Image: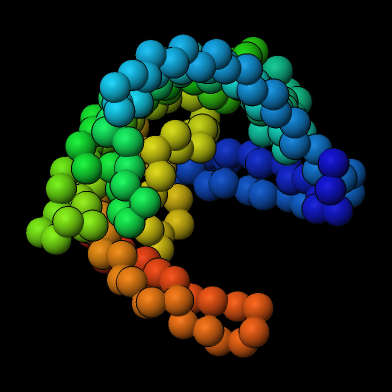
Amino acid sequence: INDDYRYGVKMEREGEKVKRKVERLSSPLVDLSALVYVPLDFSSHGWNRAFVPQLEWEFSNNGFYDTSRGDYKYLNTITSSLQFYVMRESARSGIFPKWGIGGIARWRNAIDGGENFGSMASVNLYGYLPGVAPAHGLKLSLGIQRQNVEGKNYFMSNMLNMPRGYDDVYGEDYFLCTADYALPLYLGDINVIRLVYLKRLQFIPFADFAIV
């Protein structure tokens, strides 16, 4: 519960046009969530390995109008996911692991979604490679997401991140690939003031590409 007010959202159809009407309501916004996960660790011989099944419940009392019921319905979702990774332990001088691969698959379903919300699924894979210099590193990722919105009024929030610097955009299909290159710069313990030392600067140029 916070000091924001909740909203009522309604889709109004005028012929072939669809308009979204958003109304600020007088009652406070309530967002609730609960996450349960079980980390299954198989690390050994300098390699980190794990499978992590997760289950997350989310609730918001923002109202979304359901014409079949003639009333506003809350957003109530359950998301199941399975994450895995295999990667070399990171050196103290580096930012990314030298070698590694991982991924996470998610599936989200709206509880009592009615005509408002359907279901969605996403898969995100990522990997780490050595850079040009010993402490450098490269991270590459690829993600796809699909929302089942046939006969539904609204999109659910994305499970994949948007390209950095962009607000959320919604669509049935979403594709994202990213590249990050880490260049840690050793500063040699620069003493700024008596209790503050600067040891390393992290410089990470990146590139994102998405299709919605």
Q: Name the quadrant of the N terminus.
A: top right
Residue 104 percent across, percent down from the top left: 36, 25
In the image, residue 30 sits, relative to residue 47, either above or below, namely below
**Quadrant showing the C terminus:** top left
Q: Check the image and name the residue furthest to the bottom.
A: 193
Q: Nearer the viewer, residue 110 or 33?
A: 33
Residue 155 pos. (x, y %): 48, 34
Along the horizontal axis of the image, is 97 left or right of 40?
left
The residue under the point 54% across, 24% down is: 117
Q: Quadrant of residue 129?
A: top left
The quadrant where residue 197 appears: bottom right
Image location of residue 24, percent across then percent down: 77, 52
Task: State the residue in front, 166 or 52.
Answer: 52
Q: Residue at x 57, y 25 (%)?
A: 116
Residue ID at (74%, 45%): 7
Q: Is residue 100 left or right of residue 91?
A: left
Q: Is residue 85 above or below residue 143?
A: above
Name the spot of residue 158 as percent of width and height, x first.
45, 37
**Is the residue 154 above or below the residue 203 in the image?**
above
